[in-house]
Image (cartoon, grey):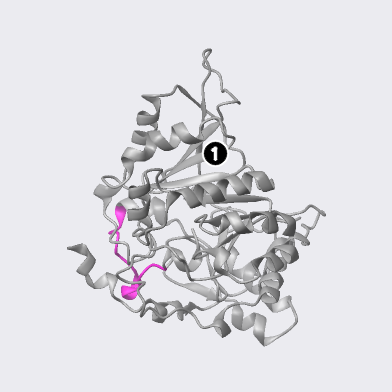
Amino acid sequence: MRNSSPSRTIPLHDLRQQALPLPKASTGAASDARSPLIDTLGRPLRDLRISVTDRCNFRCSYCMPKEVFDKDYVYLPQTSLLSFEEIVRVARQFVGLGVQKIRLTGGEPLLRKNLELLIEQLARLRTPDGQPLDITLTTNGSLLARKARALRDAGLQRVTVSLDGLNDSVFRQMNDVDFPVSEVLEGIAAAQQAGLGPIKVNMVVKRGTNDHEILPMARHFRGTGIVLRFIEYMDVGATNGWRMDEVMPSAQVIEQLRSAYPLVALEPCAPGETAQRWAYADSHGHADPQAGEIGVISSVTQAFCGDCNRARLSTEGQLYLCLFAHQGYDLRSIVRASEEDGALQQAITSIWQARSDRYSLLRATQAADSSPQGARRVEMSYIGG
């Protein structure tokens, strides 16, 4: 059984401590977003995802399987985590270099105590041309009902909720902690009432586990103003026992949806958008705004590395340039070495300008577990999805 494979029992906290050396600074480094900061493939820096905790109260098999993340698993100590002040300081430099959107992730970000205070500070940041940031958060929804109003009042604009099925037994099986789907639905309703929108609901589709929930999920959220997105089961990290035969390609998801509803393709909302958008069509074959839209994220079968504009900051200040990265760059040591921001800005600039990551484009020609010097890809629960 794959649950007993060596890759599922390696002490992951050892891997978290590794860091890449900083690239040499470019003599022509851009200093602000008016001269777009681009990587070696011409991709700008626009999106920063910040993990605020490595803990989660779910044990989804594709992210934090119970066999690895058990009662003996060693989480990061509090002293290793970036403080809110440190997170804001790093975020300010990213914003000055072109970031327009910040997404808070985890683990489960709502487990981070007093998260509203961090959101308040991030909401005060402005881009070089004076625009507010797009601040959003991804959550499993378990704590959303009690926190939605406070999050909105603090300045959070939108939430994305992970929900892998409406059938209660299927959902309890997938979260593996016997958490009821009804409480997540209550959280989504509370977020809508608080004005956190438009809300997105993400469903990871795992063939043979929850693919029969695709149409029930579409029926439930159609016409509610909530955007439902189906995500291909990804080969992230080293603990989820990923197999290609458990991936349901997005093309098959769309085919299944079209068996019940006519769909029409929509244009991307913004450069670097990961989801392919589809609208429910009316009787004339046009997008029906009342019915809303769905999306598919083809992270395995259709790579979108070409315009990826995202960077990821781990909860202890490691900067990752790809969801499938083996190692990150240590920004925490720079932050804690000096109160001056020049070295921090230069480090971010040189790291991004040296970036060449395109794992998904190369996946077809590389073994799924291939890695330099036996390294293992970082876990999604550590850097966020």
Q: Is residue 152 above or below residue 225?
A: below
- Location of residue 257 in the rendering, given as x and y in whole percent from the top left corner: 39, 29
User: Quadrant location of the N terminus?
Assistant: bottom left
Between 37 and 186, the one lying in front of the other is 186
User: Could you tell me the amino acid type at mark 1?
Assistant: Val
Q: Say which residue appears at 66% left-offset and 84% top-offset.
A: 336
Q: Residues within 10 Å of mark 1 (few under 14, many from 20)?
A: many
- Residue drawn at x 67%, y 73% is 84
| Residue found at the far right of this picture | 130
Whether residue 99 is visible:
no
Q: Farthest residue toward the left?
A: 1
Vertical position of residue 173 compared to residue 31: above or below: above
Q: Is residue 197 left or right of residue 263?
A: right
Q: Which residue is labeled 1 in the image? A: 227
Residue 92, position in %: x, y?
Answer: 72, 67
Residue 31 placement (x, y as % from top left): 74, 65
Q: Is residue 38 magenta?
A: no
Identify the residue at horizontal 50%, vertical 42% (top origin).
275
Residue 300 in the image, given as x and y percentages of width and height: 37, 48
Q: How many marks?
A: 1
Q: Quadrant of residue 297?
A: top left
Residue 368 lies within the magenta run: yes
**Relative depth, front residue between 84 and 20:** 84
Q: Main secondary structure of the magenta part?
A: loop
Callout 1 secondary element: strand
Front residue (pair 192, 13): 192
**Which residues are the magenta region?**
365-378
